Every structure is written in C-alpha cells, then in structure tokens.
Image (cartoon, grey):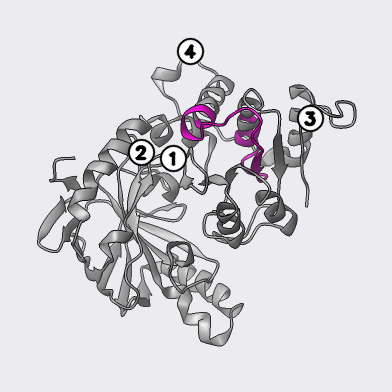
Amino acid sequence: MQSTMARKQRDNPDENRQLPDDELQEIVDSVIGSEVGESISDNTDDVDFTIEELLSASAKMVVETCMDIRRGENVLIVCDPTTGEIGQALHEATIKKSDRVLLIVMPKAKHHGEEPPTPVANLMRQQQVVLAPTKYSLTHTRAVRQAVRDGARVATMPGITVDMFTHGGMAADFNNIKKRISNLGPYFRRRRIVNVKSEQGTDITFEVNWRDWKLDDNGICNRPRMLTNLPAGKAFIMPREGTMNGVLIIDGSWDSTLLDEEIELQIENGMVIDVKGGQIAANIRQEFGEVAKKLRSKERENVWTVAEFGFGMNDQARMGGNVLEDEKRLGTCYFSIGDNSTLGGSSAVGIHIPGVLTKPSVWLDDTQVLEDGEFILDI
C-alpha cells in the first residue's frame, strides 16, 4: 500500500513536522503519476478562475459548511490514484482548521463496497472526521460502519472527479437542499406501499417501513456518527426485504455509465432474477457473479438484493454518467442492488451499485409524489 501522511503536532515538531504544501504535492504526484488530471468542462461562469482556485473553493466549502471541521479534530482524508488532486485540495483546506490531519493514498479498489486495506480501516476508527474521495464507494463497507459506530462523521465521495467536485451538485445550496428534504418528510408518514412507474415500462411495487426514511443526506454532516455522500441531496430507504415485485427499467445511468441502452431488471420477492440490456447487462451479470463466487453458497443469491430506493433532491446535480451525482438530480429516483447492511438489512455482500430512472412517476400509497420526473408536492 502506498501512502502519504502529514500530521502537525505540537509536542514534537522536528520529528512530526508538517510537510510544506509544495513538498506534499510532490509526494502525492509521485504516487499518483499520470492517472490524475481530470479536466473540468468549459463553463463561462468560471472563465476567470483556475482549476486550483475552483478546487480550493469547493474544498473550503466541504471543510467549513458540510463537515464543520473544528480546531484540534482528528481528520483522515482517504484518496486513491484517481482522486489525488481532490485529496490534496481537501488537505490544504483542512490544515487551516485543524493541526491533526492525515492524508493517505490507498490502492484503487476493484468495485464499490470493497473493504479498504486493514491499515486504512484501523486509521478510520481513530478519527473524528473521515473524508473519502475514492473511485469506488467505501460507504457500504465494514470499515466505514465501524468508524461511524466509534463516533466519526464520514463523507464519502465515490467516483468523484475534478469536474464533479467543482461544478454541478457540489455547487448547490446545501441549506436549501436540507429544507427541501425536510419538507418531503411529512408525505412519508404512515405510508408503506411504494409504486414506481415510467413510460419506459417500469412498474414495480414494494413495502417500506415509513419510519426508516433517511432524510439527512443533505450535505450537512456536522455531528458524530453522521454519514453522507458528497455531492449530497437525496431521500432514501431500504425496501422491506422480500416485498418487491415487478419490472424495473433503468434508463439514466448505471454506476459510472450514462446509458444509451436501457437495462431491464425482472424482480421477484425483492431479488433480481433476470437482467436484460445487451452488453451492459452481460457485464452486470458477470460483475455480480464474480462477487457471489467469493461468498458462502447460502449467501450468494444475496448479491441480487434490491437494497435501496431513493429520490434525487439536488437541483444543481447533473445527469452525466456518474451515479454519485446522477442519483441526486432533482426529479429522478434510483434503485441500488447488493449490500443493504448499512441500512439494517441482511445482505452483507460487499457490492452496492445504483441505477437511475430519469423521469419516474412515484406513488406512496394513494398519494402521487412524482409525475414523469416532476415533483407534484409542495416542497
């Protein structure tokens, strides 16, 4: 494992001196090499700003607004060879708030939900704040669950790029998003049947425990044991296991792919029993099949659990082929397949991949929430 560590400590400044920014950057660059260097899309609003300035502004917002990092807090920033620029920007912003900051570059994982190396997992447990901009999601890992149980507040940023970090959903007003999500809460109360339809052919019904709706994915992660994605902005829940039946047509994006061919999932009793949709469907079957082979035989079918359902609530989020932002786009909804243990379910399988519907119609019992991708409630 390659790692970069920087910690300022009062008690032994010679042995544990803070590396200068230029020296730290040189180390990070040597680890990352040519894998970094995402170019941000042209935007006339940013014509007077460099990439470095945009990164700095976004990192400052994460540190001060989203995480509210305080002086003296232990902070761990975990990146990989694809997200080094973002990790470095977060480091530079964080050391202005706390003198106990650690930046580590770990090897890139193979899929969402893969456990980080043991030294990284152990470090997570010792922090008050964990920031994880990585190619693949650490959200649904034992390491993150344990860090949260031990009191850390954690922001994961799976699949984040420089463009995503500086534009779109990350540029939203998270206080407004928090209000919008909160306003949606009363409509969930005492409603247990969810029905989702779309013009593409989705028609699926399932039960939820209405008390379990998660309404805190709003970008504000300022208290112990809180966990969020950035960019944030969704309301979500675990479907009650064994209750989902019907056809699900994913037409927006799947994981890191903007779809040009729909994916059809046949679902019975909460499990995907068939996947159709050309080459991408074949890739999905192969990816989940490979994960299943590593599990005990009685747990293998759990990789096909429909693990999560949610609404996008971020009005600045874009549909660009990265589900981290796609699933937050206002008016969309998404379904995730795989691990639901973070939400209290029984499928602990180490893979969790969402697919996004662009213009769904959604009912909670007999109350319609969305119509062709437009909220019809007063939120």
Please identify the quarter of the rendering in which residue 188 is found. bottom left
Write the start and end of the magenta stretch as one range: 62-89
Q: Are marks 1 and 2 in contact (CB under 8 Å)?
A: yes
The amino acid type, in three-letter code, at marker 1 is Pro
- In the foreground, 234 or 106: 234
Q: Quadrant of the C terminus?
A: top left
Q: Are marks 3 and 2 in contact (CB under 8 Å)?
A: no
Q: Residue, x 58% and y 29% (percent of image)?
A: 70
Residue 105 shown in magenta: no
Query: From the viewer's perspective, is residue 50 above or below residue 168?
Result: above
Outermost left residue: 366
Which dot, 1 or 3, sits closer to the camera? 3
Which dot, 3 or 4, sits closer to the camera? 3
Residue with the mark numbered 2: 317
The amino acid type, in three-letter code, at marker 4 is Asp
Q: For numbered disc 2, what is the local secondary structure? A: loop
Residue with the mark numbered 3: 9
**Labels 4 and 1: the sequence-earlier one:** 4
Outermost bottom residue: 298
In screen coordinates, is 115 left or right of 331?
A: right
Q: Residue, x 60% and y 53% (percent of image)?
A: 150
> What is the number of the mark on residue 48?
4
